[in-house]
Amino acid sequence: MLGQIERGESSPTVATLWKIATGFTLPLSYFLLTPGQDSGVEVPDDAAFQIQRNLNDLQIKTLLPFDSITRFELFQIVINPGYSHLSLPHNHGVIEHIVVISGAIEYLLNDNWLRLTAGQVAKFCADQPHGYRNVTQQTAVFHNLIFYGESYSG
């Protein structure tokens, strides 16, 4: 898969980017920034990088790129009805915070799906299998703040 990406024959999915980032102990936003973007640089909305998977299922937009001082990055995630995203465990010390902006989502933790609606928040250690899904008929939007432990470089 890496060879195909290097040759420009394939585009990585979000899951593939996470695996690569985890393998190199880098934050996900490392792969999403344009050259020259740095901590403290305000990213205008129209310049924020988006990844789309299957064009209609999941969109991720970087709101705040990884900052080596605060050790976090912030994403806006739009998840369409009927879609689920499962994630392998991240490195030890990674903590995810989710804030539902609109609609409702369920997140997977300890083999249980837990429901959150607009305005609700959750925080969990992401060094375990976890995931997100939208079982409603409406598109859901949530913010995902990912805090990286000391083992990550930026």
Image: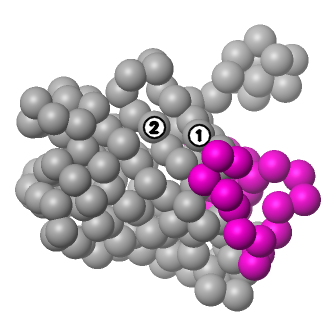
User: Which percent across, then down, holds residue 46?
Assistant: 64, 46
Q: Which residue is drawn at 23% across and 37% down?
A: 139
**Pick the front one: 32 or 141:** 141
Highlighted range, magenta:
19-47
Q: Quadrant of residue 78?
A: top left
Query: Tag 1, which secondary structure?
Result: strand
Check whether the beta carbons of the residues at disc 2 and disc 1 lie within 8 A of each other: yes
Amino acid type shown at disc 2: Gln
Which badge, 2 or 1, is on the more N-terminal residue?
Answer: 1
Which residue is at the far top? 9
Q: Which mark is residue 59?
A: 2
Does residue 89 appear in this view?
yes
Label 1 CA crowd tier, 10 Å (few <14, some 14–19, many 20+)? some
Check residue 57 for magenta coloring: no
Amino acid type shown at disc 1: Gln
Q: Which residue is drawn at 36% across and 27% down?
A: 57
Query: Tag 2, which secondary structure?
Result: strand
Does residue 153 appear in this view?
no
Q: Is residue 123 above or below residue 141?
A: below
User: Which percent across, then down, holds residue 50?
Assistant: 59, 40
On-image quarter of the C terminus: bottom right
Q: Residue at x 77, y 17 (%)?
A: 4
**Pick the front one: 6 or 68:** 68
Label 2 CA crowd tier, 10 Å (few <14, some 14–19, many 20+)? some
- 144 horizontally vs 142: left or right: right
Q: What's the colour scheme?
A: one colour
Residue assigned mark 1: 50
